């Protein structure tokens, strides 16, 4: 006589294996009610599937052991009609699913997972009773658990999921774990769009695990959904009260992004509302990444876009924040962003610190805190100390204000070695040289060349050669600043540099000093021309372009790009996009004998380097045979 518990389990087993196998002839198991610790035999019929004519059908099973999925290869033997094999079920197995394929397991040439429904079976424990995983395994399979996507597609069956969840919960002595409940909750919410069941599970998760990872994530999501700015701030503050970062740091997991996002949002809100005391107080809880980004997105924005009085007002805030950044810089908080690559993380940390110091020094300059600004250069990483041309110029200004003349020449020489020099710095270095040589300029160019690194020159040449091209130029005629037309066909016998720019493009504007250096260098050379073509602009772009360049004192040959077929001011630039494979500016090109011979996008940040790059390209093209 069959015992009742086993009879019940067998009936349930049969009811779900029909669902899992779809057709009785496709896969059969012996015994039909698998038991943990025993070996089962399986027989697979590939007829009518992509594997029907395969001579090398393979199989792999995923065993649900101790509530974890473990892969187990299954060796198959080809018979006259079926592929057969055996699978030893470990003593702790509660459930398994299997798939068949040809080729590599991760990239099969053909496969069969029962048209997405899966081949699977629950497993009775050694006492021939169902355990928690008996039902939970199927639930995870039908939900489309990440580990099981190749074995079955997600099934949209809320009723079945609810039944399996209830039975799995009944068999668990302590109830399902937070992670398991959270996975079911996401299945209800995102796969089934079943808000009622999702909310019910959310309430259970919060009740059983009020400070757990799922409750934290759910509360985080809810806070971010708040649209009213004032209520949004309150929601973020409430989140931090309910889930203090100090508690999370005792056992940190994968949710650092939550605190980063919350603190970033609060910091921006406090800063925009001028709640500076609250803004500064946040930094006590920050790691380096969060502190750095809060500074960058708020204070650095003022440095880039604000007026001098705005920068001056930022110094007290920056003075309080910079010590945090210097203290926290080596805490490894950017490590996840670089996949654990220490070298990349350290390189990023050095760059971020250098950029923040540049901003702080800018505030010091605006506020007249010259001594403090000059002292902050000691905190720059050694390899970053002279590689920022604008910062070098600021350093020069501070030394002049402090009367520390003996430090000026070494600064300028180091800047030349790093090829990070502005026009003003070149003027100052030449003045220093003339003062030391009784006003005689002879030998200055040789002195300047002697300061440059041979390695840097070699690297620059490699960059220039990599950007050499051969691309036909469609002749064009464009209006200049005086309203006259300039025709490209008149440039025969010349090497012509063109800089595509726009008034709205900050990198374009930042590159202007370097372009002016280039223009001045070739001002007396009739075989070289330099033109600045304003493109992709709006409104009264002609007047804007001309007035901006004049107001800044640049001596440019301005041209206005023509209007294209769609009414956009980009006709010449657009004709070259097949060469560029990009619509980004600034973009420098060099033309010789009716061809584009050089093309480079972007700006390195150094006027002297830009001049050297384009000068080198010009001379290479000039010396071609």
Image: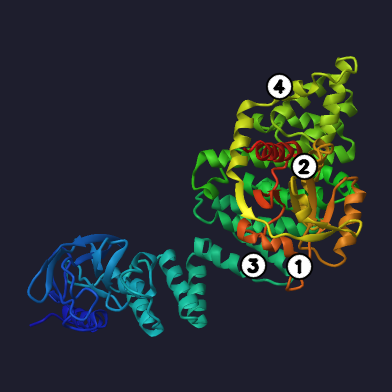
Looking at the rendered structure, the secondary structure element under dot 4 is helix
Q: Nearer the viewer, mark 1 or mark 2?
A: 2
Residue 224 badge: 3
Q: Position of residue 132 (x, y in %)?
A: 30, 69
Please determine whether, in this image, residue 121 is positioned above or below residue 572.
below
Q: Position of residue 425 (x, y in %)?
A: 82, 31
**Residue at mark 2:** 528
Task: Please report whichever mark, 1 or 4, sits nearer to the chain's N-terminal start.
Answer: 1
Give 366 or 588, whichever is nearer the viewer. Answer: 588
Task: Please report whichever mark, 2 or 3, sits nearer to the chain's N-terminal start.
Answer: 3
Looking at the rendered structure, the secondary structure element under dot 2 is strand
Please determine whether, in this image, residue 555 is positioned above or below residue 149.
above
Q: Nearer the viewer, mark 2 or mark 3?
A: 2
> Do the numbered discs 1 and 3 sit on residues whose CB atoms are within 8 Å?
no
Task: Please report whichever mark, 1 or 3, sits nearer to the chain's N-terminal start.
Answer: 3
Give 406 or 423, whichever is nearer the viewer. Answer: 423
Instruction: Indicate the quadrant containing the N terminus: top left, top right, bottom left or bottom right.
Output: bottom left
> Do the numbered discs 1 and 4 sit on residues whose CB atoms are within 8 Å?
no
**Residue at mark 1:** 230
**Residue at mark 4:** 450
């Amino acid at each position: 006589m069959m015992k009742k518990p086993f009879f019940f389990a067998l009936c349930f087993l049969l009811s779900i294996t029909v669902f899992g196998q779809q057709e009785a002839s496709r896969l059969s198991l012996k015994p039909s009610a698998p038991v943990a610790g025993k070996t089962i035999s399986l027989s697979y019929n590939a007829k009518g599937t992509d594997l029907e004519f395969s001579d090398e059908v393979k199989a792999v099973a995923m065993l649900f052991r101790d509530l974890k999925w473990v892969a187990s290869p299954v060796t198959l033997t080809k018979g006259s009609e079926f592929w057969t094999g055996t699978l030893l079920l470990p003593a702790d197995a509660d459930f398994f699913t299997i798939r068949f394929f040809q080729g590599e397991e991760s990239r099969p040439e053909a496969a069969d997972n029962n048209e997405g429904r899966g081949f699977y079976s629950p497993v009775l424990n050694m006492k021939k009773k169902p355990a928690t995983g008996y039902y939970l395994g199927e639930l995870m399979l039908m939900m489309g658990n990440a580990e099981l996507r190749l074995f079955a597609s997600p099934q949209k069956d809320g009723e079945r999921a609810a039944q399996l969840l209830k039975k799995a919960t009944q068999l668990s002595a302590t109830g399902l774990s937070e992670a398991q409940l959270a996975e079911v909750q996401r299945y209800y919410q995102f796969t089934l769009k079943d808000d009622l069941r999702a909310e019910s599970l959310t309430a259970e998760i919060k009740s059983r695990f009020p400070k757990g990872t799922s409750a934290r994530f759910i509360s985080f999501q809810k806070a971010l959904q708040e649209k009213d700015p004032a209520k949004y701030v309150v929601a973020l503050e409430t989140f931090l009260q309910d889930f203090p970062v100090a508690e999370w740091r005792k056992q940190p997991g994968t949710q650092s992004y939550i605190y980063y996002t919350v603190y970033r949002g609060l910091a921006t809100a406090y800063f925009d509302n001028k709640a500076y005391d609250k803004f500064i107080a946040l930094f006590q809880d920050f790691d380096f990444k969060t502190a750095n980004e809060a500074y960058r997105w708020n204070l650095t924005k003022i440095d880039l876009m604000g007026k001098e009085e705005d920068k001056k007002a930022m110094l007290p805030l920056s003075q309080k924040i910079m010590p945090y950044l210097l203290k926290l810089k080596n805490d490894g908080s950017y490590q996840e962003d670089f996949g654990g690559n220490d070298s990349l993380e350290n390189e990023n940390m050095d760059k971020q610190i250098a950029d923040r110091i540049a901003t702080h020094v800018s505030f010091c300059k605006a506020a007249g805190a010259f001594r403090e600004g000059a002292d902050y250069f000691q905190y720059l990483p050694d390899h970053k100390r002279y590689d920022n041309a604008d910062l070098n110029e600021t350093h020069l200004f501070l030394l002049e204000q402090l009367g520390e003349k003996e430090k000026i020449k070494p600064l300028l020489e180091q800047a030349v070695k790093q090829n990070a020099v502005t026009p003003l710095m070149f003027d100052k270095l030449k003045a220093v040289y003339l003062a030391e040589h009784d006003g005689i300029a002879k030998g200055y160019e040789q002195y300047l060349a002697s300061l440059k690194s041979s390695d840097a020159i070699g690297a620059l040449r490699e960059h220039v050669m990599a950007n050499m091209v051969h691309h036909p130029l469609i002749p064009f005629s464009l209006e200049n600043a005086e309203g006259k037309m300039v025709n490209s066909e008149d440039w025969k016998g010349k090497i012509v540099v063109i800089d595509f720019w726009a008034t709205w493009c900050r990198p374009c504007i930042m590159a202007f000093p370097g372009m002016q250096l280039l223009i001045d260098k070739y001002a007396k050379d009739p075989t070289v021309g330099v033109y600045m073509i304003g493109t992709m602009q709006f409104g009264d772009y002609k007047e804007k372009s001309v007035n901006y360049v004049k107001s800044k004192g640049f001596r440019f040959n301005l041209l206005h790009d023509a209007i294209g077929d769609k009414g956009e001011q980009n006709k010449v630039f657009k004709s070259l996009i097949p060469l560029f494979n990009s619509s980004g500016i600034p973009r420098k090109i060099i033309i010789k004998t009716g061809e584009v011979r050089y093309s480079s996008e972007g700006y390195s940040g150094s006027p002297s380097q830009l001049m050297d790059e384009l000068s080198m390209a010009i001379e290479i093209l000039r010396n071609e045979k």
